[in-house]
Image (spheres, helix red, strand yellow):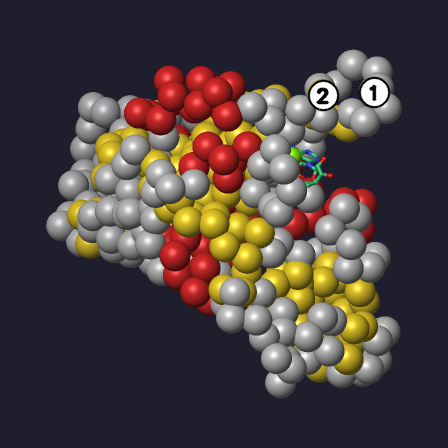
Amino acid sequence: MVGVSNALSRVADHKARVAGLVGLMPVAELPVADCLGLVLAEDVVAPVPLPPFDNSAMDGYAVRAADVASVPVELPVAADIPAGRTVARALEPGTAHRIMTGAPVPPGADAVVQVEWTDGGTSAVRVDRGVAVGQNVRRTADDVAVGQTVLRAGAVLGPARLGLAAALGFGSLPVRRRPRVLVLSTGSELVGPGVPLERGQIYESNGVMLAAAVREAGGEAELLRFVPDDVEAFHAAIAPRLGSVDLLLTSGGVSAGAYEVVKDAFTGRGVEFTKVAMQPGGPQGAGRYQGVAVATLPGNPVSAQVSFEVFVRPALRAAMGFAVVERPTAVARLSAPITSPAGRTQFRRGAYDPESGQVVTPVGGPGSHLLSALAASDCLIEVPEDVTDLAAGAEVTVRFLHGE
Ligand code: AMP
Ligand code: MG
């Protein structure tokens, strides 16, 4: 273990600080169609059975199995039952009703003969093969009984669960609502698309990236991209919005130079700035300004995005009620050697190849401005604080940049 300056915060400590900032989101009743990916806040109990009535599993003929016990046999077709028919007419013995998939099986019928086993007749039908009692009939409550708890509080709402809720007649569900995040990019050098760059200017990228990361995590993002390095302008930008956000997420303006607007605006006002023992992403800040949770990320794009992954994403997922808040990880072997600074956890960008026996290839160098390397990566290679040299073939933990 190489000496670590006491001035540095541990990654785990800063993570805990950010995790505690955003509380559990309140429960909101949202339209089912808007609940994808959200966490259910209460158990869902079936108000109706599924299926709600005995219905046909086939296009064919509703019959009494006894009437087709010896085949071939011809039966008069006494009725036609398309799906959606709500008026029930009883089946008389010795007759058939033509019935469509999903249509209600008439009282008196106990089976359905599929159309392929008949001549398809409309006034009379010849049945060539018999059926057993219950055949091709989907019974009431086969799937779900009334009063059954079909989804538990804490369930993550994917497409099938939303489909089930809709099938049970729910128009809305109680969920933990999405956290609202104000994403704010600081820097007088930042300009927008369509503006030819003057020397010293760059196109703003962190805001787009972090707002997308917030949405990918399940949050709602409002984006303010061009806040100059001016404390007054900074306060003017955030003041009207503080009342409506759960988290203020800034990038830039927190390192050791002059004109560090975020630091200048928040120092001594509830936000604590620190240097975390990590690379990239050392300069960080977290706290509460006028009651609103604040996380301040460094300006270098790779630092900003990596710190979002390490600190902010788990906090947002926890606030949304997810039981699992971390990305999946895997153990992989390095395809090439890497070095890492002593006393810092390094998060190198990597491309994971599960085919070749869990091998990960470092992409680009450690520079926190190498955005194209991040864009070409699908994981972060985590190098522990006390490790400075890793040979090709060494085992490392990779943290994926996708997945829950
Ligand atoms: P700062 O932390 O403000 O000193 O920024 C560190 C580096 O990141 C500088 O090279 C900035 O130009 C760059 N940077 C800061 N904010 C952004 C942004 N929103 N988009 C792209 N680059 C940025
Ligand atoms: Mg700056």
* Type of the residue with mark 2: Val
Residue drawn where x is 18% and y is 41% of the image = 48
* Circle 2 residue: 191
Q: Where 45 falls versus 194 (above or below)?
A: below
| Earlier sequence position, callout 1 versus callout 2 | 2
Res 35 → quadrant = top left
Q: Where 368 falls versus 174 (above or below)?
A: below
Identify the residue at the far left of this view.
147
Say which quadrant the N terminus sits in.
Answer: bottom right
Pointers 1 and 2 in contact (CB under 8 A)? yes
Frontmost residue, 124 versus 3: 3
Q: Is the residue marked by circle 1 packed among few (<14), some (14-19), or many (20+) residues within 10 Å?
A: some
- Dot 2 beta carbon under 8 Å from ligand 1: no
* Circle 1 residue: 197
- Give me the disc on residue 212: none
Res 362 → quadrant = bottom right
Residue drawn where x is 73% and y is 78% of the image = 388
Frontmost residue, 31 versus 276: 276
Residue drawn where x is 83% and y is 20% of the image = 197
Q: Where 175 falls versus 394 (above or below)?
A: above
